[in-house]
Amino acid sequence: MSGHGTSLRGYILTRLALAIPTVLILLTLVFLLMRVAPGDPITSALGGRVPAEELERRKEAAGLDKPLPEQYVEYLGDAFTLDLGTTINDDREVTSIIVENGSATLELTIAAFIVALAVGIPIGLLAGRYRDTSIDVGGRMFGIVVYAAPVFFTAFLAQLLFSNVLGWLPSSGRASPVVEFELNKVTHFYLLDTLFSGSWSDFWDVVKHLILPAVTLGLLVSGVLIRLVRVNLLQTMRGDYVEAARARGISERRVVVNHAFRNALVPVITVAGLQLAILLGGAVLTEQSFNWPGIGAELVRYLNERDYIAVQGIITIFALAVVVVSVLIDLINAFVDPRVRY
Amino acid sequence: MRLPQWLRPFREARGLPRWILISGIAIVAFFVILAVFAPLLAPYGFDQISTDGVRFPKQASPDSTHLMGTTVQSTDVLSRVIWGSRTAIEVVVLAVVFSLVIGVPLGLISGYVGGKLDRTLVLITDALFAFPYLLLAIVIAFLLSDTALGQGVVTAAVAITVVYIPQYFRVVRNHVISVREESYVEAARALGAPRWTIIRRYVFYNVIQNVPALATLNAADAILTLAALGFLGYGIQPTDAAEWGYDLQRAIDDAGAGIWWTGLFPGLAIVLLVTGFTLVGEGLNDVINPLIRTQRIERPELPELDLAPAGGGGAIAEMAGESEPHGEVRRE
Amino acid sequence: MGRSAVSEPILTVRDLRVWYGTEGDPVRAVDGVTFEIKAGETLGLVGESGCGKSSLGRGMLGLLPEHTAVDGEVRYRDRNLVGIPQKEMREMRGPELGLIFQEPMTRLDPLVTIEHHFLETLRAHEPGLDEDEMRRRSLESLAGMGIPPTRFKQYPHEFSGGMRQRIMIALALVLEPKLVVADEPTTALDVIVEAQILGILADLRRNFDTALLLITHNLGIVAEACDRLAVMYAGRIVEEGEARQVFSEPAHPYTRELLRSIISLRTEGLHYIPGAPPNLIDPPPGCRFHPRCPNAMRVCAERFPIQTAVGAEQRTECWLHGPADQIPEGGTEPLEREELALAEEA
């Protein structure tokens, strides 16, 4: 039972290989979902507004006149090459939507995730450490209430307080109109782009616009993290190795922080990553509340316009993103926890 | 009066878990009452904009005639909050019942029978899990709105149901699998009990313990999802019924003007009801799961040892003539 | 390391009680236990599962959970360990007192290396020590247990159960404690590994002059490794003496029954002790073994036995050995069969 150093590499390869069936299933589900409604997407979107021959032409261009199985294969192929087509109504390349708006969502999601970790983990650890005290009860109630408040309500309150009453922070958009207009969008991550441009005031402007949405969304997820971290900590504190460490005269503080906390956080990595699903859902709502031009907002817009192709493309990307994150999480896990590699 | 078997953990619960459970139930009950008695409790109709021919003021702040103020459409906020309870409870009940009725039997059968059926179902539900559930609900609501169901209570409920079935399925299935391997089930099988009897008598009752807690969490999520759909415009049509999420959508614009009452009250209603369901769920978990149950166990009082001086030293001597080694043990 | 004066007791336990709080009446796991261990001596503590032996070990080192009450005297080198401040207790765990646990599989933090475990332990007690010196001492300790230095930086899951137990022992010994409590150290291990561990523990006596309290339910181990033996039943020590003596001439009926239950190749019918293990919340009146005792007398059901000496180095708590003047009239009559049966059911 001796260790093999190459196993981390082996694990990575295996994990990547396993991702493929998941992706296939998700894509299939998306495909089926989009074809549940009767009729075809093009007609639903444009029917009545466009002459019949134009409708036929567009249907052909989108490949919707072919038999279902053929469409399926074509869809899979397109997904893998990331050629997701052009939107029905405004003729945008779906991939460009993803690049421009996707980066907005990504920036928001990452910032929110950081907030969630920064709030959720310490509170969860404290609640578990001081179990059944007022700290514990307070922490748990905070977690429950924060999850119970819909993102758009928190957004409402945040805007009321910080934008209206206090006037400290803006409540809409990624940056002030002037800044946005003049910014050289290299990566489409405004935080990075403003840094590259060298203007501190621009950078600060972007940060101010990011704070409210990120905190609003992050708090939502922190509620889940609090409960998770707390339960894990309660379990690890009762662990055998914790008792054994005490028996060797290690100080209580070291025992709790170095052994109990660390072990408690290991499964959190996995679940925290899975919270991405919640984050993505929440992102849609947050973007609506703060006029954040992310991919969620676009999804809503295209849904309203009945633009099935755009909707299908965006959902496909969501599905792929979730799988990618899931693989990343597993890899991080393998790095942190030596048991996983073998 | 002897309590039925499944009620006993509730009786035995003490301290914090009991309070959590009780507060949760109280909150939920409050909203159920609001929902049931809405016509009696609400001062006005949910889309009423005038009374006796006089139109309500627009965006009026709270006062004696409109305790929670009015919206930009001149509707009364308090009435909409109360009518909104009815909508919420209706959707929740439908969604939870649908999910339970489909998800639980599916999990039971899949878990017990195993094999290809099980593997396929697990694969599908795992993939569904990965998907952001709100997105799924939105898409389904959107798709169904084109069909005969239209945009109403049932559509919203179905959208939520579809998203939650995998949860019930997974929890029930996993539990069935672990119970299936227990010795008492094996013994029953060895004795020749028919499959259905085993499922019904042993597996079902065991597994069903997990379901109430999950159902309450389902209810909590259902309310949030319903509100989210309403916020985005895919929920209940404003002409059909009042819905808190829709109200919040309207209220976001108000925040910029400093109008707080149109958003605060519906929002608080959501927070309160969801918290209520969550507390019930947490309370149930703490009460039903004996492993997590922590009673405040007191350190015992050790009775005094009376040490009578005698040869042979110490505790040995005093035990002469006693039936107990340490004098009388005081028992209250 | 020369042998110290053997007659000096390094540990004196007097009237130790460990009671666990429950939702109802407390569990009297250890209900008045008295014994001594001399420097360099090995005392075996034997009993059935649930007789309180583990509570005894943990109670001595102050590792019991919140809801337990500990009372009595545990005198280690002129200090009573019962009730001393946590800080002082912690300072003694390692350099003075060592504890070896039962299940080695879960006793090491899975996220850190063996090296980390050792350095952490050494740093906690000898912070001034230079890190290379710490490593040297750790490797020495491990080598004594047969663990090669090449494995120093590996993770716990890379070792088998037996090796992990050896690592645990090395960890317990690295600070050279004078008294080690081993709580069922080989119960979770297979027979071959068990023999190895026992050999190591026997060496402790010889090479390190460490006193050892070996807690186990396995009499076979005791025969191998111990100088003296104490038999525990229902929270009390019912017999105690020099190991060889107790094995050849057991005084207490329970000890006799235990010895009779040992299976060997010559065993023809399985012998077992009838009845159930005693209820520690509400123990039977009088002698706690009387419901299951083949030699029970009337007095045994009425009065708690007084400890008496049997031979030079042996003591027992049993009315069969007197003192006769404390037994009332008719008390030596055998306990009636029905009474025995009833008592068995109780």
Image (cartoon, coloured by chain):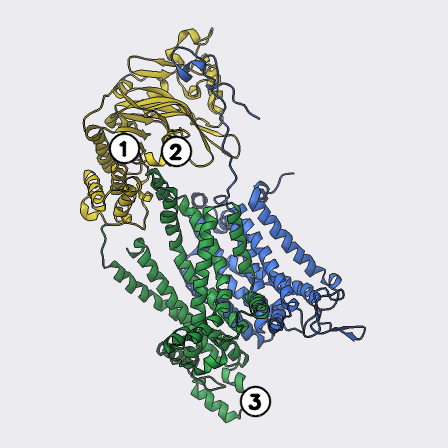
Chain colours: A green, B blue, C yellow
Of pointers 2 and 1, the one earlier in the residue sequence: 2
Amino acid residing under circle 1: Pro
Kindly tell me whether residue A255 is visible in this rendering: yes
Helix, strand or loop at label 2? It is loop
The residue that mark 3 highlights is A48
- Give the percent coordinates (x, y) of residue B135: 50, 70
- Give the percent coordinates (x, y) of residue B7: 59, 44
Whole-Å distance between the Cαs marked 2 and 1?
16 Å
The residue that mark 2 highlights is C62
User: For this view, does C209 lie left or right of residue B332?
Assistant: left
Amino acid residing under circle 2: Gly
Q: From the viewer's side, name the closer residue of B243 and C270.
A: B243
Amino acid residing under circle 3: Gly
Helix, strand or loop at label 3? It is loop
Name the image quarter holding residue B5: top right
Q: Mark 2 lies on which chain?
A: C
- Quadrant (top left, top right, bottom left, bottom right) of the N terminus of chain C: top left
The residue that mark 1 highlights is C177
- Give the percent coordinates (x, y) of residue B38: 71, 62
User: For this view, does B105 lie left or right of residue C140?
Assistant: right
Q: Residues within 10 Å of mark 1 (few under 14, many from 20)?
A: many
Q: Which mark is residue A240?
A: none
